Amino acid sequence: MKTSLLFFIFFLPAFSFSQSSTSTFLTWMKGDNTINQVGTYGTQGAAATGNKPGARDFSATWKDNAGNLWLFGGYGYDDNSLGYLNDLWKYNPSTNQWSWIKGDHTIGQTAVYGTQGVANASNKPGSIYASISWTDNNGNLWLFGGFGNTDNDFGLLNDLWKYNPATNQWTWIKGDKSVDEPGVYGSQGNANNNNKPGARYGSRTWTDATGNVWLFGGYGLDKNGDAGMLNDLWKYNTSFNQWTWINGDDVIDKPGVFGVQGVAAVTNKPGGRYVSVSWKDNSGNFWLFGGSGFNESTQGSLNDLWKYNPSTNQWTWVKGDKIINGAGAYGTQGSADANNKPGARYVSVSWTDLTGNLWLFGGYGYASVNEGYLNDLWKYNPSTNQWSWIKGDNNIDQTAVYGVQGMPSLTNKSGSRTSCVSWTGSNGDLWLFGGYGFDTNDAGILNDLWKISSMTSPLPLQLISFSGVLNNDIAQLLWQTDQELNVSHFTIERSFDGIHFTATGNVNATGNLYKTDYHFNDDIHSRAEQKVFYRLRITDKDGHYTYSKIVWFDRSSAPMALHIFPNPASSVINASFDQIRTGPVTIHITDMKGIRVLNQTENVGTGRASINIDVSRLSAGNYVFSLTGATGTIQQKLVIAQ
């Protein structure tokens, strides 16, 4: 194996033993860092490292009692094409693996309803976009409405489904098999077997302590069959299989009644809206933020924050603006302030953390001034009624910084995006998947999976640097410290996937209060993996420890130095590159929708290689040119001119 002489030097911020600092790290955990990728389904029911859902937005999601993420449908890519989906996936955070559990791996599927109320292995929802979902107290997954397929038609839906993970079966529970059905409201506050919300998508939902499900708004049909923005609030009792219209209006496009900020009132109500975000706090109150809809009189993007108390059946306008299209007030990143506020936006995502704070990410709307795609991360503390801008940018249309997959970093950031899905992990980490937005360069549909973690780092010294050299398969690790106080030892931890680390050696601390240099050599001749990762675990004499940043080495040769000429091109291009050994090279050209328009494989020898590719049949536009050879895959933008 040919090895490279590679240097990785990181200058870390100095941390004092007597003080701690809490920072928010983003980790790109899974999926692709390029847009419009197809899925890899693997064997149904079997987890595998290579499995991944295709890029998609407006999916439905759940978290089960074991902390796994479940993902259903949306609009995006199967293993070949772009369209509406009905595939059901499970992600296990502990193994970092996806499993395709149920549904189809082709787009545009119709539903199989079966008998209402009866589970069957053949039952399945059709391909659906922008439905809503929740998990009941027994661990069943529920799905309502959206825009998609019935068994013979396509449109707005109000069918209600239950999925039992233990039996791997769907049950059609309630609602219609036909599209675009109006609501049946009945008498406000009274449950009835005939009651039903009208067909809709982009609603919000939450569950209460007794297992009832609450549904708010969306875009859909009112009691008259008219389509528009809704502000109706419903409760569904899973035990009695009955809907109750609780609050709000039974007709579309109603303006809000804000009342006095901070004061609950029977007459208060949010205006009709859809694709807003919502939370449930530790007291069982429902919180609603923004969306596209109505303020007191006008339709637009919103940033008003509301709280609903189920015990009093009253809304409170808590924070934010009564105007539409309001700009954000970011303040100082990481600092709460009464004047801070996210700008008006819709199609964002939200979480609740373990301490009851409400979190908001991205969407389409207003940053400081301009309107566009957002990647700002906010935290709202209900007890102080203050927002904090935590992470991301205060500007629109930002590209991502992925870093190394599996490695947290303060510099990593998600690109600006909308219509992704989110959930809170069992340990309080926030998770984010897919949506429509930016990779490192372009905008499109995404399938990247991110973990957002807040870490308190009480380093017991100043770690000035941690670096390394890989020479003849010997990793020579070097680090320098200063002001060592109460430090016991350094544990060198090694990984070959950047996620799972094991100890490979220890070095005792000297305890010096001045700059001290350390080194450690690790022989990896016997290992076949191409990449190797190292970090330091720094342990003090009281047994507390923290980690350094990570250094890593690539044991293969340098990149293939791909050069395409001419570019822009119209007929024939020449691709030249370096090849470390004789063998096949595969070329793919993909359009901006993620569809492969050209495949070509050639056998080439060692050294500088050259291949001619006929592109005369391609339409004018932008493409991605991918070349896969002995040292991996390299990509470049290709422009086809008229």
Image (spheres, grey):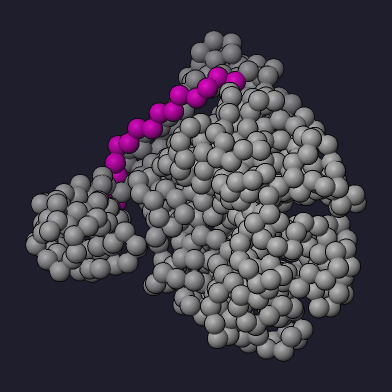
Q: Is residue 144 visible?
A: no
Q: Is residue 37 left or right of residue 461?
A: left
Using the image as rendered, state which of residue 9 and residue 385 is in the foreground: 385
Note whether residue 280 is visible: yes
Quarter occupied by residue 473: top left
Q: Where is residue 369 shown, x and y percent of the image? A: 48, 32
Q: Nearer the viewer, residue 422 or 28?
A: 422
Q: Considering depth in this image, is 150 or 10 the residue closer to the camera? A: 150
Stretch of the chain drawn in magenta: 1-15
Please say if 350 is above or below 24: below
Left or right: 382 in relation to 78: right
Magenta highlight: main SS: loop
Kindly identify the residue that appears in the image at 78 percent across and 63 percent down: 234
Q: Is residue 277 above or below residue 101?
A: above
Look at 51% across and 80% down and name the residue there: 109
Give x and y (percent) for residue 611: 12, 61
Q: x%, y% of residue 226?
A: 63, 68
Relative to 397, say whether 226 is above or below.
below
Residue reaching furthest to the bottom: 115
How many numbered marks, from 0 up?
A: 0
Residue 217: horizontal and vertical position, in percent?
69, 58
Rendering quarter of residue 303: top right
On-image quarter of the C terminus = bottom left
Residue 503 placement, left or right of 608: right
Q: Within the image, what quadrant is residue 149 found in?
A: bottom right
**Residue shown at 69%/71% (left/top)?**
224
Report the front residue among 535 and 527: 535
Q: In the rendered view, does 331 fall on the left or right side of 578? A: right
Confirm whether the magenta stretch covers residue 13.
Answer: yes
Residue in the picture at 57% in, 28% down: 330
Is residue 309 one of those drawn in magenta? Answer: no
